[in-house]
Amino acid sequence: MATPWKDSPVLTAIKAYIDDLHGGNVRAASRDFGVGYETVLAWYKGRSTPKLTTLANTLEVLKASGKLQQSGAPNKMHQRAFEDFEFIPRAIAVAGCGESFQTEDGLQSLYAFRKEFLRREGIHAKDALMMYVTGDSMQPTIMDKDTILIDKADNEPRDGYIYVLSLGGALMVKRLQRIANGWLLRSDNERYAPVSVQGQELETMVIHGRVRWYSRVI
């Protein structure tokens, strides 16, 4: 389930860390997070959200302090439930819109996944990212406006699997099929012809990660 950043337990924990452990001293907290003072102040004031590159260390500091668990757990029962989840960020980029894969942008929301599910599937939260998908090229497997979970660590192309990739600057979701000297980018929707990527064109293809999960509203 997606949680808007302004309502997220992570932002609540950041504010609690600054107020409770540093008496509201943002500069002191920024040193703990390893993030610039102006950046942390903007988080604290609600003027901006963390970038993915700055979030990882901040989460570790919050977990070690206990503030991350406390921010979402008013009692011990809720705290145990909260600790069963990892929070996966959703990037601003939208697959299918021809956008670049911009994971440095501010987060729009967080999705909660059970740690047991991620362990079972071999997905590490630090390597995971959520994205929206537009278009019908992957129907009926992935529908227009679905949200997908990408495992960025699984970025070696393999035959038959679905990946988020860039080709010539366009961001897309495609199933890969191995061919001589390259790959076919296939759509599950038979209305779309496969795209052959061979020779020098392979140098322009970037695999961002494998699609491991999707959700939709029905």
Image (cartoon, rainbow, N blue to C red):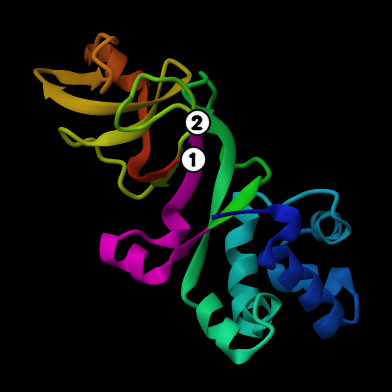
Q: Quadrant of residue 173?
A: top left
Q: Which residue is mark 2?
A: 145
Describe residue 156's horizontal placement relative to residue 116 as left or right. left
Residue 199, how many percent across, how many down? 22, 13
Extreme-front residue of the structure: 218
Secondary structure at badge 2 equals: loop
Residue that appears at 62% across and 59% down: 55
Query: Is 39 drawn above or below residue 142 in the view shown?
Result: below
Residue that appears at 70% across and 68% down: 33
Describe residue 48's horizontal placement relative to residue 119 as left or right. right
Residue that appears at 85% across and 49% down: 47
Residue closest to the eye, 215 or 163: 215
Structural crowding at the residue carrying mark 1, measured as other residues with C-alpha within 10 Å and reported as few (<14), some (14–19) or many (≥20): few
Q: Which residue is mark 1?
A: 217
The answer to the question of whether label 1 and label 2 lie on touching residues, with beta carbons closer than 8 A, is yes
Report the span colored magenta.
112-133
Q: Quadrant of residue 6?
A: bottom right
Query: Is 187 drawn above or below residue 42 in the view shown?
Result: above
Residue closest to the eye, 140 or 106: 140
Describe residue 39's horizontal placement relative to residue 144 as left or right. right
